[in-house]
Structure formats: structure tokens, C-alpha cells
Amino acid sequence: MFALIKKFITKFSEERYFSLKFRLILLNTLFSIIPLVIVVTITYFWISQIVHDEFKNNLKWQMEETRHSLEFFISERISALTFLVNSYPEEYFTDEKKFSQLFFNFKKEFEGIIDMGIVDENGIQALYIGPYKLKGKDYSQTEWFKEMLLRTDYVTDVFLGYRKIPHFSIIIKKQSVYRDKFWLLRVSINMDILQKFASNLEISSQDDAFIINKDRILQTNSKLFGNVLEPLKLNNIRIETDKRSVTIYDIEFNRKQAYIAYAPIKGTPWILVTTICSKPYKKIPSLFTKEVTLISLLSIFVTFIVITKSINTLVNRIEKADHEREIAIANAEHSDKLASIGRLAAGVAHEINNPLAIINEKAGLMKDLIQYGDLAQNKDRFTQLIGSIQDSVARCRTITHRLLSFSKKIDRGREDFNINEAIKEVVGFIEKEIQTKGINMIFDFQENLPKIITDKGQLQQVLLNIINNAVDAVEQGGTIEIKTLLLDTNHIEISIKDNGIGIPKDKLKHIFEPFYTTKKKGTGLGLYISYGIIKKLGGDIHVESEVGKGTIFTIKIPVNPELEEIK
Amino acid sequence: MKKTKILIIEDELELVSALTERLTIRGYDTHGVTNFTDGLKFIKESPDVVILDIGLPDMDGLEVLKKIKEINPSIQVIMLSGYGDDEKVSKSLSYGALDYLIKPVDIEELVSKIETAKLKKGGR
């Protein structure tokens, strides 16, 4: 991937521009996708919350439904039985045959009925129709019988009873009109009916729905908390039996988050309980996440492509502009050199014209001697004059060589030379100007300096620039002092001090900037180029100045730049 | 006929000596010096023509020209210039120099300038 990006963005790029592009693309892409990430995250949590609420509402609704069904189931049977007891003549509840007929008719109409019996006021089962032999059994000590002394109808908990099978009973009391006597009609219903109601809830296989009584005894089998008639093995929940509505809260079950919902069943001792461990509310966000992830990735990809394209174009333009600027500066550097040469030329012309004039006059004199004198007598004079001409030619050669060596555009590269001599040469270039202005030159050179290895032409260009500036800065008869000093084994310091007009502080900080000049005819490139050259040669340049007192330029240059590079 | 007196003030000794000898061959009473101080005593002897280098070690050529003209305005001065310093040349003309020549000079041209100077001096 990285190689692909690199291939994509390094088109026409150097390493430094590649690094710039890479950083810009990375930064821009990051900042561009931050809002997207924020929006997606917020949306995710928002949708999660909605799905969560939806799940809770659905659970509540299902619980209500089941509760209503169960309440209806019970109340329907109570009403029917109450109707039987109050509408049918007494003989239907005393005569076994009629009672049996009544039972079968009832059983046909109402689901889940196992048996039916009549219990007299002493708690003895007087009549019984059903699969078990329970006639004559004594129920006087049972909970429900005691309850029935005070009530007209009653729904029992699930219990085993004499038959040893979990069931519950609905009991209706018939009060005798004559005396303070009564009898009870009791029907038994299989526990499976309750189990069926609980399993009607639409829940997953990991979840559980069951019924408990007010003493937290299971009234149906539970997948997670035990079998019917066992105590509920879930102690950390609080169940309020007198509440009418469905209550939902979250618990930690088996170290996982789970929901528990309960609803008391009106008119019964039961409470419908559901535990949800399957996290159905997580499914929809995951679906949502897939789509959003896809869209987000697509957006990030598009953003990345757009940013990469635009930054590529931008940096390529910067690179092009930099390149053009470099060329412009190189040209400026060259023109600065030419300007320096122009200034030199005046001095050099004078220097060259003097020996030329000598040659001219000596040759002229020789011609005169031939014309006016005796050739044989003047042989020695001729030899002397020719020698003088040759001396003047040598003088011219030195000057022209010096100028040529300086004006070469192509860097000759590093060479070793004595810095003191190089400075003298530079001063030699503008000697005439110095002389005319009556400048007092002081050379305070440290003797026995090591030969420095650097680009002589470039260093001399810098020195010429600074010395020229000093010449311009001083008044007639001013002083320029040039010092050399060995700082340490690998550094030489050259300082050029003048007692000229000085540079104001606010201007001093700009003097190494391009196109900044305080002179009327300056290009503003001299010091800028000098700074660039010194830095390129591995050295350092700085300036101190005080208005009215003068300026001092200090150049620190390595004796051997290779030793610097190794460092 | 009285020889024309010429004084050459030029810092290059070799040049002064050759020029002096050549002008002497051509019949002029020529003296050559390499600085103004030496030149001053000859100026007091009222030479007809002074050939003066614009750049001298001890005093600027223009200053020398002014001095000469102060001492004796009738002395004709021909300036010698090492390079075309237009400003100095035009100043020298305004200070009263007769003409100027750029080194190296052609001896015939110099002679003709000297002759012009002589005529000019004679005409005064």
C-alpha cells in the first residue's frame, strides 16, 4: 500500500518534496475524516439507543400480551365455574352421574382441565371425577382450603398434591342459603398450560421465560434457573408483586449483560418472568455498521484520492516555483559576480593600462632610438628596454590571470590555499579604489595558519563583496581592518571591520535577505549570496554594527569541510 | 628659440623615464617626477606644459591640478588617465585642464596636444 502511494505521489518528485507531500496528504486526510468518524460514531450510538429502546418496548409489549392472555384464561374459567355453581341445581353437585356429565361438558369447552371435585365444609372430597382416585381425600389442612374459608374463589400455586404431579387448582365456593354451610367446586389444571403460555413469548433459545409465585418458587420449568417447584436461583433481583405494569431492568448474569422483565398476573399468585441474554438489539447495529463502514471507506478513499491529487498538483507547482527560483537565484548570483567584476574592471583597467603604457613608451623609445640614434651604440639600452617590456607584460599577465580565475562561472571545486594570501589577492583587486579613497588598510593576520580546503573562487567572491561594502561605508581616509584567527583545529575566523557609517538595528536583521539594499545602486543580492555561499562551504557568517561607529563582519570557515561532514 | 618646458608627474617611474626621454628626443625640455611634492619645485619654475596623472599616491590628481592653476594659471595641463573615469575627466576639464589622454598614449597625439598647449599659452 505504502509502495503504491509512494509510486503514486513521487511522480517528478525529489525526496524532500515527497516527504512534504506525504505529510500533507496524511494530515489532510486525517483532518478530513475526523468529522466523518464523529458523525458515524454518534449515529452508531444513536441507532444503538433506538434499537435498544425498540427492543425494550417490544419485550414489554409481548409480556403484556402474555399476561393478558393468562389473566383472560384464568378469569374465563373462574367466571364459567362460578356460573355453573350458581346456575345449576344442587343435584348436579351431589349426584355423581350428573356431576360427571357436567365435568365432561365443561372439559370439552375449556382446555387444560384434568379433573373436577366437590369438597365439603370439612375439607373432605365428597365427589371426584378425573384420572386419579381422590374421592374421600382430606384437604382440611391445605393452604387453599384455609384460604377458601374467607374467599369465594381462589387460584392455587402449582403444587404436587396427592397425585404427585405439578398442577394448580381453581376453587369456587358455594355458600348454602340455609345454614352457615358451604361446599367447594375444585378443578385441576395441568402445569403444562402455564408452560405453554410462557413459551408463547417470541424469544431466542438462549433466553428464558417462566412463571414464579410470590415466594419465588418456580411454577413452570426454567431453562436457566431450575425446574418446577424449585426455588428461583436468582437472588439479586427485586420483584415487586403489587406492581401492575411490566418492569424491565438490566442485570449481570454469568458475567454478561442481560435483561430481566417481570409482570405479576392479576387474580393469581403468579409472576411472569423473562430473561434475555441473547442481545437481539446488537444485531441491527451490526447490519448498520456494515453499510456505514462501506460508505465511510468509500468516502475516505474518495477524500484520499482528491487530497492526493490536489496536493500532488500543489506541491509539484511549489517544486516548479522553487526550481525556477533556484535558477533565478543562480542567475542573480552570476550577475552579482558580474557586477563585482564590473567594479573590478575599473581597477583592473587602471592596473593594466599602467604596464601597457610602460610597454608603449619603452617600445616607442626603442623606435625613437632607431630613428634618431646609433643602433650599435644603444645595444645595451635595447636589452634593458626589452627587459622592461617583458616585466610589464608579466605584470599584465598576473592581473589578467587573477581576474580570469575570479570570473570563472564553473566552480573549480575545492583546493587548498592560504587564506591570508587569498585575502591579499582580493584586496589587490580593488587596491586602486582603496588608494584613491585614502583608506588605511590594517592586516592583522595570524601567521602559520593551516591551508584551508574550500572553493577559493566562491570564498573570494564573498570577501570581495564584504570588503567592497566596507570601502563604500567608510569616509575618505577611513580604516578597514582585516583579521584572521585560528579558532580551533578545524576553524578559521576572518573578521572585516570598518569605521564607516554603520547599519541601523532595524536594517541589520534584513541584510542577509535577498533584494534588500541600503545603497542607491545596489542589487540587494551581494550579502544574500555571500550568506548562501558561506553556508554551502560549511561556515557561518554574522554581522555586528553600530551607527556612526562601524560594522564588523565575522566569517567562520572550516579548514577541512570533510571533517565537518564526518561530524 | 627657447625650448618648451614640460613637466611629467606620473607615479610609474618606468613610464616617467621613457616618456621623458622620448619627449627630450623630440626637442622638449622635459622633467619627470613620480609625486606631487617633487613636482612642486618644478612648477615654481613655470613649465609650459604639465602632463599630470589623475591618480597620484600622495595627492589626488584633481587636487594637484587645482594647486598648479592656483600657482600659475598660464601653465597648460594635459591629464593622463589610467581608465575612463568620466567624472574625474570632466571635472579636470572644468578645473582648467587643456585636455586628457587615456593610457597608453600615442606619442604623436601627445606631441600634437603639447603643440596645441604651447599655442594656447603663447596666445594668452
Image (cartoon, rainbow, N blue to C red):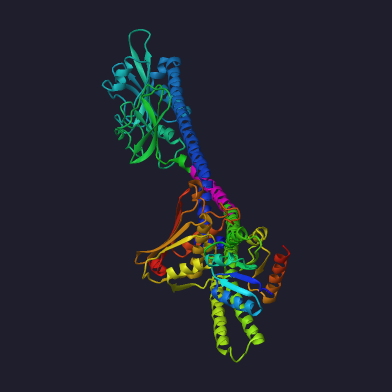
* Quarter of the rendering containing residue B3: bottom right
Apparent side of residue A168 relative to residue A345 in the rendered image (left or right): left
Q: Is residue A300 magenta?
A: yes
Q: Nearer the viewer, residue A204 or B124?
A: B124
Where residue A473 sits in the image (x, y, percent)?
52, 55
Q: Nearer the viewer, residue A71 or A351?
A: A351
Q: Residue at x 42, y 31 (%)?
A: A112
Where residue A60 sits in the image (x, y, percent)?
46, 30
User: Number of labelled discs?
Assistant: 0
The answer to whether residue A17 of the structure is visible from this angle is no
The main secondary structure of the magenta stretch is helix
Q: Residue at x 42, y 17 (%)?
A: A85
Q: Nearer the viewer, residue A523 or B36?
A: B36
Apparent side of residue A241 relative to residue A408 in the rendered image (left or right): left
Provide the residue span drawn in magenta: A284-306
* Quarter of the rendering containing residue A381: bottom right
* Quarter of the rendering containing residue A420: bottom left
Q: Is residue A362 above or below residue B64?
A: below
Q: Is residue A67 magenta?
A: no
- On-image quarter of the C terminus of chain A: bottom left
Q: Residue at x 44, y 64 (%)?
A: A538
Q: Is residue A343 above or below residue A51?
A: below
Q: Is residue A378 above or below residue A549?
A: below
